[in-house]
Amino acid sequence: MEQMQPQLRPTQAIEPSSLQATTEKWFEYPVRAQPHHTDYAGVVWHGTYLAWMEEARVECLRSIGVEFVDLVAWGCDLPVVDLSVRYHRSIRMGMPAIVKTRTTAMDGVKMVWEYIIQSVDEQELYATAQVTLVAVDRDKGKIMRQLPAAVQEVLARLVG
């Protein structure tokens, strides 16, 4: 018999009700720097920002009704082929932040996402980034010539 884990309410600072696409096509994803995100000095490790960006991208897709497993089921993978990150200011253990993301361009099977990671009050800029993804056929392991119609339809809603 499977036991259910108790569901805990999130803190007010990172309430998931904010997981909605916002104006200017930015999607906002709240995070908090946990001990396992940091180095011994309590500063967030640089790779954590990348994980937060991917989480934001996956949640952005979920906000328009697409589970990442749906893309996989359609035979489409979206690996990162280019990544540029600029770190502006450190985030320390316990600090909340907002990861903002949006799709800025879609050209054939290539998609560009932008990111801003900032304080909840938008007064501090922690990082900016740009990530390029390409659609790959999961079975063949090759870049697709064009997106499957279902994937095209879904992703068009982000660029719209």
Image (tube, grey):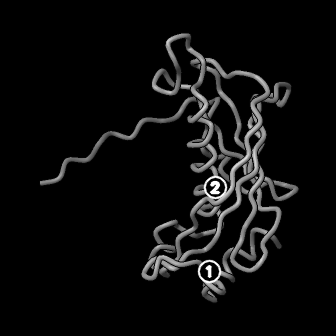
Q: Which residue type carries mark 2?
A: Arg
Number of other residues with Cα within 10 Å of mark 2, as a class: few under 14, some 14 to 19, many 20 or more? many
Secondary structure beneath label 1: helix
Q: Residue furthest bottom?
A: 149
Q: Is residue 103 above or below residue 151?
A: above
Residue 92 position, x and y percent, is 63, 18
Is tag 2's residue or tag 1's residue first in the polypeptide sequence? 2
Quadrant of the image for the C terminus?
A: bottom right
Position of 143 with respect to 27 (left or right) is left
Mark 1 burial class by Cα count in 10 Å: few <14, some 14-19, many 20+: some
Q: How many numbered tags mark residues here? A: 2
Looking at the rendering, which quadrant does residue 94 occupy? top right
Residue at position x 65%, y 27% from top?
96
Give the residue drawn at x 56%, y 43%: 51
CA gap, disc 2 and disc 1: 15 Å
Residue 138 in the image, given as x and y percentages of width and height: 46, 77
Determine the residue located farthest toward the left in the rendered image. Answer: 1
Location of mark 2 (residue):
57
Camera-nearest residue between 135 and 12: 135
Residue at left 70%, top 41%?
A: 99
Quadrant occupied by the N terminus? bottom left
Q: Is residue 36 left or right of residue 153?
A: left
What's the mark number on residue 136? none
> In the rendered image, which quarter is residue 33 located in?
top right
Q: Is residue 110 above or below residue 139?
A: above
Instruction: Quickly name the residue at label 1.
Output: 151
Specify the farthest residue to the top: 41
Depth check, front residue: 27 or 136: 136
For the residue pair 70 and 112, the one nearer the viewer reads as: 112
Identified by mark 1, the residue type is: Val
